[in-house]
Amino acid sequence: MTGSIPTRATRTLPADYFTDLYAANPDPWDFTTSPYEHAKYAATLAALGRPTYAEALEIGCSIGVMTRRLADRCGRLLALDVAESALDTARARCADSPQVDFLRAAVPDEWPPGRFDLVLLSEVLYFFTPEDLSRIAQHLTASLKPGGEVVLVHWLGETDFPLSADAAVETLIGLTAPGLTPRHQSRTERYRLDVLQGPPVSAPQAPA
């Protein structure tokens, strides 16, 4: 039926889904040319709470268009994706940014070690089942430095992914509470942008 809602996938989308996607089209979401994407990148950067971040992590960096823009705000940026061809393009795009490292990894099974001041998950949460989102939430709360930020940016249109944008984001917010709390939440007709913040650094106790 025309206009019917597509049947959702019942499992987290596998790495092969993305490998095949990039094999068919090296820029499947028009990241390099879409005015929508570039306006969304600008809004994402504007929502960040600090001018710079010592250690940042980007989950699902794709071909590195946002990665290159985010790199200017980071002392070190680790960017992950599951598709090696996308990472090859991202490495070339960020060749003039030595503070950026790339890693082929599939979260939540392959979460990188270390702790981060910023974690960006842009257009990725709805690829996961609620069970895998629970594991991602555990990784986030364990790897975020005190006062660090988690940025979530997701398209609001209908898909056949395991979750809608609102369901995925609200699930993650619930799973990371009360440790992470929303600091910024906004939405346009096409996407929502949420910034969660970890608890601040604990003040040292005064001597008795």
Image (cartoon, rainbow, N blue to C red):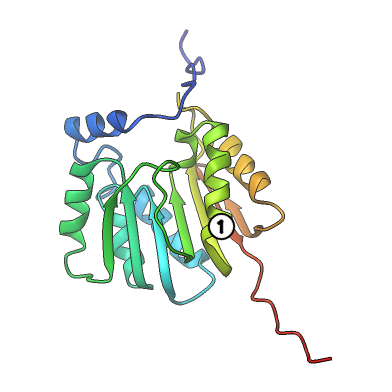
Query: Where does the image place residue 41, in percent across and percent down from the top left?
Result: 39, 57
Residue 145: quarter of image: bottom right
Q: Is residue 41 left or right of residue 202?
A: left
Which residue is most to the front?
Answer: 208
Which residue is most to the right?
Answer: 208
- The residue at the point 50 percent across, 67 percent down is 48
- The residue at the point 64 percent across, 76 percent down is 201
Residue 13: quarter of image: top left
Q: Is residue 38 left or right of residue 101?
A: right
Where's the C terminus, which quadrant?
Answer: bottom right
Number of marks in the rendered image: 1
Q: Is residue 35 above or below residue 53?
A: above
Which residue is most to the bottom?
Answer: 207
Residues packed near mark 1 inside 10 Å, few (<14), some (14 to 19) or many (20 plus)? few
For the residue labelled by badge 1, is the local secondary structure a helix, a strand or a loop? helix
> What kind of residue is marked 1?
Ala
Query: Where does the image place residue 198, in percent across and percent down from the top left?
Result: 62, 64
Q: Is residue 137 left or right of residue 182?
A: left
- The residue at the point 45 percent across, 29 percent down is 12
Query: Where does the image place residue 97, in percent across and percent down from the top left?
Result: 23, 70
Residue for badge 1: 142
